[in-house]
Image (tube, rainbow, N blue to C red):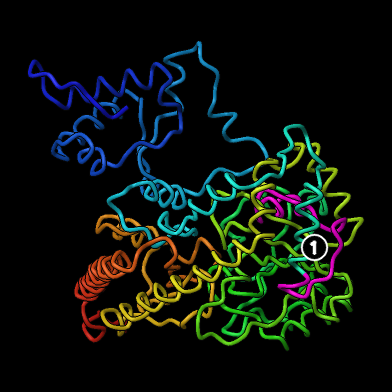
Amino acid sequence: MWHIEASDDEPMYRQIRRHFERLILSGHLIPGQKLPTERELARKLGVNRSTITAAYDGLRAVGLIRSTQGYGTHVSEDAWGLNPGLPDWNKYNSQGLFQPTLPILRLIWDANSNPDIINLARGEISPDLWPHETIRDLLASTDVPIPMGYSDPRGLTTLRSTLERHLVHRLGLHVSADEILITAGAQEGLLLISQFLLKPGDAVAIEKPSYAYSLSLFASAGLRLFPIPVDKAGLQPEAVKSLHRHHKIQMIFVGPTFQNPTGTTLTKSRRQRLLASCTDSRIPIVEDYAYGGLELEGAPATPPPLATLPEAKGQVIHVGTLSKTFAPGLRIGWIAGPHNVIERLAGAKEQMDLGVSSLGQVIAERLIATGRWEEQRQHLQHVLTRRRNTMANEITRIMGPDVEFRLPDGGYHLWLKLRTPLGERELVEASLQDGVVVVPGSVYGADAGYVRLTYACASENQIIEGIARLQKALRKLISEKNWKASARQNDQGPESTLPSNS
């Protein structure tokens, strides 16, 4: 789409402008679609930025594109009037259950696919850790027949039975196979719960900050979100009673072990106090245990899952996944909870998609039953420990005076606090210009001045270089901020020189 056959017959900016006119009028670029920045397009086409500026100016002049400060350049919605035979897709794009992706998230996602940018943002393990040989061996050696028809919407009986034994052995979670629903990852589990156990207008509580703020599924379900503060020991359970008293909280969503994005683990005493508060008010808890199996080497033992504590008394829905501990593309997760809840969600899932891929379920069952999942988990523990240590050492070495952080005991993420808060979009854009992508804390509902760094998706060498690039971007932004503050102060002059009203 961005390739242009250049000609010497006319100026390059006119050729670029005409190329975009064709793309827009033919419908290849639709109204509202974001266009590359002038800098990005100049790099893609190998021309000067001034050439792109002239081309964009021409497109703006005829109303084909529009530019908005802070949101970039988009195809104009008015362009549909130039091609009346096409449907108004922009109207449809603004409707539906799920809300449009936030502009800052789209910027980050687009950068995730750029091989020239070091990725400290993406919440998955890097390709060199994907267990290709394990999958090949299992597929070559298994004699288990793979069902080709629609299976039980709750999931294959063999997988649920194997998971039943795994959850007891690994976590001490005693559930039967009939109390397990197989899902396409943990996120689908959260989607099913939010869409089919709650109704629009219900109040739910989530941690602040939390990965849940980056998801549109809660807002799409019409739920009202209320925050529970998080500190170094996890969420503060004392906030639950007050929230329920004022807002009638219907459900609490919590990641108690290596929480995303902060990496904190809820202490056992806080788990017990949270359960006690919820028991008193009959509030169910959804436990997102996606990172639960990823404790790092040398870390203290993690407290048992909420669902296994005696105080739980059947009030916890446990959500797990293989995506974080095996491979991101193996979209196999599960929900473990009361039998009637599983039946309700299984019925909803059957209406949605008739169940999860049978092939993926057979692979997952073999991984767990043969012990290959445990081998991969232990390998990840070793590699992620080295990567976390490398990241922490580099941050301390070259960013020490500018930041604060706590060493996470598990999971993928290091939660960085900037001592000089910066504009979130400016931070992302400056980091991208210097060749590294990170996620600002505002995406997760945090106050200004926080950044989530992921050490799972980059090698140790990439982490070292990525931290250097991030520091370069930070120092540049801090210098600009200090210069602007100094300029404003000079413009105003010292307070003593202001005229008196007397």
Q: Is residue 241 among what the camera can see?
A: no
Give, as a three-letter code, the residue at label 1: Glu
Report which quarter residue 260 is drawn in. bottom right
What residue is drawn where x is 56% and y is 59%?
A: 326
Point 68% across, 40% down: residue:
357
Kindly give the residue lying farthest to the right in the view shown.
340
The image quadrant where one finds the C terminus is bottom left
Q: Give the residue number, with chain letter if any, for mark 1.
A: 164
Residue visible at 55% across and 18% down in the picture:
87
Front residue of 412/57: it is: 412
Residue 323 in the image: above or below residue 452: above
Q: Position of residue 188 (x, y in %)?
A: 68, 50
Say whether residue 191 is magenta. yes
Left or right? Give the position of 58 relative to 94. left
Farthest residue toward the left?
8
Q: Position of residue 308 (x, y in %)?
A: 79, 76
Is residue 43 or residue 115 the one in the foreground?
A: 115
Give the residues in magenta. Answer: 168-194
x and y, in percent, of residue 203 in the image: 77, 61
The answer to whether residue 315 is above or below residue 304 is above
Left or right of 360? Residue 317 is right
> Can residue 463 be seen?
yes
As displayed, is residue 4 above or below residue 458?
above
